[in-house]
Amino acid sequence: MTVSVLVVDDSGFFRKRLTEILSATGEIRVVGAATNGREAVEMVEKLQPDVVTMDYEMPVMDGITAVRQIMEKRPTPVLMFSSLTYEGARITLDALEAGAVDFLPKNFEEIARSNSKLQEILRKRILEVARSRVRSAPAGNGDAATTKSRTDSASSAGARPQSRDASSRTAPSRGEATPSVDRGRTRKTPARHYDVVAIGTSTGGPIALQKVLAGLPADFPSPLLLIQHMPASFTPAFAERLNKLCKIRVRQAEDGDRLEPGLALLAPGGKQMLVEKKGGTATVRIIPDDGRLNYRPCVDVTFGSLARNFPGKTLGVILTGMGADGKEGCRMMKQSGSVVWSQDEATSVIYGMPMAVARAGLTDEVLPLERFPQRLTEGVV
């Protein structure tokens, strides 16, 4: 299966470099290159690539506008390239809201120190993005923002159907079967009080978290902990964004923060977040990462600390994301008597993390994304 890619960037050097790296693997074929957003929109309709890599600052039409138009005309998975700065984070979050699936630093030295490692990272990310689900409208457009498969979006827009290989990329990765645990076989858990609600997510998570948290009331009765795979330079901007959009309070967690009802603490990028309980007071511990874990922050680390400190009193939630981070943390939670919910396949951008939890039989409820705000509101007392 070969994945076709359209490269979009106004830098000739970057287009050439990225094309060389991606073309070095037999699984990816670069079918075209655009120098600005307007060209990108036109070439997506003409070439119908499986994935678009997109710069955000370009002449004629910027990357965010191009993403919006691509999602309106022919929804296609988009991987953004961004700078690891506060402004770069803000722009990248706008691009994700416009419909982009994921992002990577534009400076390749920030991704990997060797060409072989860089090629492997880019290859894996492109292939994962190709299997993602894309939205046919920006996230701010209500129900139209519900994630759909590429084939469904294209059909509803009157576009020609995808080839069999292309449309199959919305399915789970090769070797991963659809889990037996689904919405029809999980029971609605009774309403109860939880000392902590913890939400873990990765690819597709920024918009998923935005949709879930924006639907919660200001007097939400439990503290919330958020673990989103994200670089250190991005989490402050993301926490600020969520705080502006939500009725509950949201901020980036700091060492020593106390857990409070109606307060969501976002794990800072590049570090690990744990919880410790002393004398009836629960506080957050932010510790440096020692390099042994793939994810910084790591869902398993935070969930594991909650299983130890709040046995049977935590609600763990796993949303969209690639990989299996969170599965072992959920296992520890379940062993301690706590409850786990996960997002369903149909509304996940990448059905990796939720699928890992469901396949392991750790999910008490499997829910579509749009159901989480109501279920949290009625199920947490």
Image (spheres, rainbow, N blue to C red):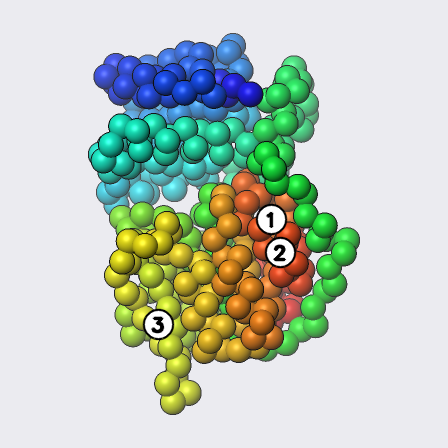
Q: Is residue 243 visible?
A: no
Q: Are marks 1 and 3 in contact (CB under 8 Å)?
A: no
- Point 44% across, 58% down: residue: 299
Q: At which x and y percent is residue 148?
A: 62, 35
Q: Amino acid at mark 3?
A: Val
Q: Kindly state the secondary structure of the residue where label 1 is placed.
A: helix
Q: Amino acid at mark 1?
A: Met
Q: Which mark is residue 360?
A: 2
Q: Nearer the viewer, mark 2 or mark 3?
A: 2
- Point 27% across, 28% down: residue: 115
Q: Kindly state the secondary structure of the residue where label 2 is placed.
A: loop
Structural distance between the alpha carbons of marks 2 and 3: 28 Å
Q: Which mark is residue 284?
A: 3
Structural distance between the alpha carbons of marks 1 and 3: 28 Å
Mark toward the start of the polypeptide (2 vs 3): 3
- Point 60% across, 75% down: residue: 337
Structural distance between the alpha carbons of marks 1 and 2: 8 Å
